Amino acid sequence: MPQSSQASLWNALSATEDLSARFVYGAEASIALGDLVAGSTLYGRGDELRGLSVLVTTTNQLTTASALIELDGIVRRIVLCPPDLPLELLPYVIDSADVDAIVSDRPMLDLEIPRAVCLVPCSHEIVPEKCERSAQHQTEWILLTSGTTGLPKLVVHTLTSLAGAIETNSTSADGVIWSTFYDIRRYGGLQIFLRALLTGTSLVLPGAHESPADFLSRAGHHGITHISGTPSHWRRALMSSSAHLIAPRYVRLSGEISDQAILNNLRSQYPQARIAHAFASTEAGVAFDVNDGFAGFPASVINDTPHVEMKVEDRSLKIRSDRNAIRYIGDSHILKDTEGFVDTGDIVELRDDRYYFVGRRDGVINVGGWKVYPEEVEAVINRHGEVQVSLVRTKKNPITGALVVADVVLKAPSQAVDHDGCELKHDILLLCREALSPYKVPAVINFVPALPVDETGKLARRHA
Amino acid sequence: MNIRSEILAQFRQVAREQDKRLAPLTDQLELVDSGLDSLCFAIVVTRLEGAVGIDPFSVSEDAPFPVTFGDFISFYENAAK
């Protein structure tokens, strides 16, 4: 249902008085926002996409950035593919999201696509074009998160829900240059992209193959003042002597549990910076920031956060706000309870009037911001002919927050002794490496005589 | 037990497993230039905890992260004292 005066990214940008000094900087190129408002990176074919459901799959963040600005408000739906989405899952996504068109900077998409779709190339080169861009749709933004079955979940947002935490009338944007270690094709990075666009700043993005040291050096060169990443991103950055090349005024962490060590290390590296850790998720949206330099969050946050209602029920943090995602696409998942709260699945514990995050209810292991479902890894290990059963669990890690380790029961336990276990462990790991992404492969395999089983007859998982 | 040789062995083993090209491991080598990524370091730290029985990262919340390979070794050697 087209409407006449929707807010869109393009509307917001074109209403800005002076775009001349505003850029999105990538590793190999940059985009002048002023040029983008008056031109096209879709070779002027944006009009063909009006009202359609459009999948955006790109090889780099700059083309994503320009395509998003051009498509929002014009198309009915943007489906934003994260950089690591296996191409073989595209047909599933295309089918689920009723995709009519694909915008891509890939030279050729060799896919069995289940529907007739229109292919529109994009690049970061801007073609001057006189185009009618007034927004006609409140575009649905579909973000992908990993699901238990190996198929991604499709999470529906709008620009309003995505930008709900961004104060656009703030006058404090003077001299601010944002940057992020995140990729803008995921929720955490998209937040920073929108923040930069809507609050009138430039943005420095990492390149796909750029080392942390090179990125920090480039970010320092551009004089970034505000920068976000996961605790794992930051631990990696602090292990680089290039960490001193940036002098941020604001350092933001999200996406994983921020422990006291990383907060202390950042404070000592950037004494001049305000260091905040935020709670946000693709489904629940941005909930709150913690600015006191301590891990966890004061209990008062639950009741005193403006625009966000929270409760802790059954140890899990639940959130209701207009920043929540709208729904999932597909019937099999339910996003909100009957009262409209999103269950984050993050388990919190109250100690001395402060809540601390202790893990995930569903046992999902968070390896440096990547979700690992233990069952998926176990299924691979259990394929090995010598394995009777396995249990995959989390092990705390100072670099990535957590790692995956596996306890394995063998069919013939003497096997492990016969070969000192090494050969067999190597064999199992080989199987895992062939079938799983590197962060899902167990760092350590332990052979154990038996695994505990709970009263329902299931493997006893020590979830938080 | 020689911590240095254990660390060397783990760096090489993890690089091989993760298909990373390991730079020559001198004490001056910056860890970011070693060819290992965060996941590799995470695995190295976990395996070292199993092999030498210590995780110096968890000992102090204020310890600065090691920057060079030499720092990394001293970090473990000091924690083992």
Image: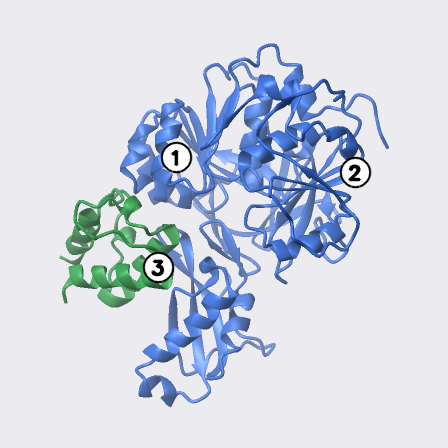
- Residue A437 position (above or below residue A232): below
Mark 3 to mark 1 CA distance (whole Å)? 24 Å
Mark 2 to mark 1 CA distance (whole Å)? 36 Å
**Percent x, y for residue A355?**
48, 45
Q: In the image as oriented, which residue stretches furthest toward the top?
A: A17
**Percent x, y for residue A335?**
70, 50
Of marks 3 and 1, the one in the foreground = 1
Q: Callout 1, which amino acid?
A: Phe
Q: Which mark is drawn over residue A381? A: none
Q: Is residue A306 visible?
A: no
- Residue A217 position (above or below residue A60): above
Q: Which mark is drawn over residue A52? A: 2
Element class at badge 1: helix
Question: Quick one: label 1, few (<14), some, or many (20+) residues within 10 Å?
Answer: many
Q: Nearer the viewer, residue A196 or A361?
A: A196
Q: Is residue A30 visible?
A: yes
- Tell me if label 2 and label 1 are in contact, CB under 8 Å: no
Q: In the image as oriented, which residue stretches furthest toward the right?
A: A1
- Tell me if label 3 and label 1 are in contact, CB under 8 Å: no
Question: Quick one: label 3, few (<14), some, or many (20+) residues within 10 Å?
Answer: many
Chain A: what color? blue
Q: Nearer the viewer, residue B79 or B3?
A: B3
**Percent x, y for residue A126?**
60, 24
Question: What residue is pinned by disc 3?
Answer: B43
Q: Give whichever of discs 2 and 1 has the lower sequence position.
A: 2
Chain B: what color? green
Are dots 3 and 1 on a single chain?
Answer: no
Q: Which mark is drawn over residue A215? A: 1
Q: Chain of mark 2?
A: A
